[in-house]
Amino acid sequence: MNTRQTGSGSFLLLFLIACYLGADTVAQSDHIKLQVGTRLDDQVTPCNEYTYYSVEFTEACQDLRVQLDVVEGEPNLYIAKSPNKYPTYSSLVWSSYNWGGEDLIISSWDPEFTFGTYYIGVHAYCGTDVPTGNTDSRYSLLVLSEQTTHPHTEIALGGSQSSTISANGYEYYRFCIPKSCANVEVRLGNCIDPTACPTSYAWPELLVSRTIVEPRTTDHTWKLATIDQRSVILNHDDPDFYPGHYFVGVFGWCTPAEFCPDPATCGPCSYAENHDYNVSVLVEEVTSGCVPKQPLELCSLGWKNIGSPFLLLMGLLVGFILFFKD
């Protein structure tokens, strides 16, 4: 039996069963729809139960803010992305536990953030350990889109930032792409020619990451590691390119003196210290032949329309065929 095919069949079988169970759960209850910027008043969640909401958030470069104003009771707030459509206190979620109200911000530069559908659970906590006792939770909900903040310097689209880099040191920046129909070039400019700047040329390296806030040369990133090519290019049809925040690292690569007998040819660390450079982000909008990318979500809810028993039967059949295939 082919081991690789067996593993693939087992994975698909488990995946389809998980999707079936998720679709069955979704079929039992609907989420209350929220609109960004519109407050939903007069909400009630009974003691120790959950009420679930959903909101479509389309701003890839804005923060998602959820405000819960308490009228009475002790509601707690839990937020998740697909496939967790019913977040609880025991699942992997963003959460807030403030007394008298909840105010939760999900930063758009959070590695787990993507534009798309967010699922909000409000739990009415009741018990003798809270002043509200066994009081149902009454509250209002408001979802907002807000300007993000981050300690790294932001490079405006079409703009640049200049600074100096130390030998073997790092400098960090960020930029944000609001939509997927665009080609992006992150360009590093500095003197790399020993004839033009014989005692101050250097070969710093450029790193670009979608998930690592402070990327390093050993991380899984887009990299500039040649002298001839001085930019990292992100094309709209690159499967790893999505709207959102990107993090830029500039590394002061250099050659230690003991390994650099001819400073005019090997980029010594003495030249790389306090080296001037600039980083620019150039964006070209793609207007033809580009289909905007959608956020990746497992277990599409559309499957449940086929019929859950049929879905489970077909999933089991396909899984077992792949499992026992030679």
Image (cartoon, rainbow, N blue to C red):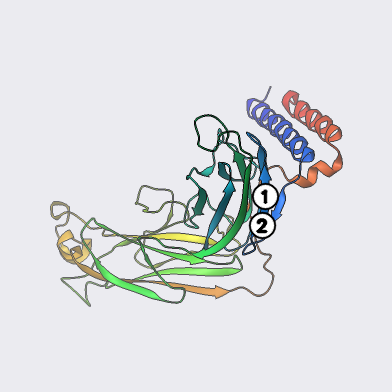
- Answer yes or no: do the residues labelled 2 and 1 have beta carbons within 8 Å? yes
Instruction: State left or right for residue 63 relative to residue 43.
Output: left
Which sits in the foreground, 51 or 263?
51
Q: Nearer the viewer, residue 221 or 191?
A: 221
The residue sitting at 61% across, 54% down in the picture is: 141
Question: Which residue was labeled with disc 2?
Answer: 40
Q: Considering only vertical position in the picture, is 314 above or below 147?
A: above
Q: Secondary structure at mark 1?
A: strand
- Residue at x 23% of width, y 55% of height: 168
Amino acid found under the numbered disc labelled 1: Gln
271 lies left or right of 189: left
User: Based on the displayed image, in which of its 4 quarters is residue 91 positioned?
Assistant: top right
Does residue 51 appear in the picture of this structure? yes
In the image, 54 versus 184, the foreground residue is: 54
Residue 260 coordinates in the image, percent (x, y):
16, 57
Q: Is residue 259 above or below residue 201?
A: above
Rendered residue at 65%/63% (across/down): 38
State the SS at label 2: strand
Q: Is residue 325 above or below residue 68?
A: above
Circle 1 is placed at which residue position?
43
Q: Locate the C terminus and report the quarter of the image it occupies.
A: top right
Residue depicted at 69% across the width and 21% down the height:
1
| Quadrant of residue 125 within the rendered picture | top right
Label 2 Cα neighbours within 10 Å, binned few <14 / some 14-19 / many ≥20? some
Query: Label 2 sits on what residue type?
Result: Leu
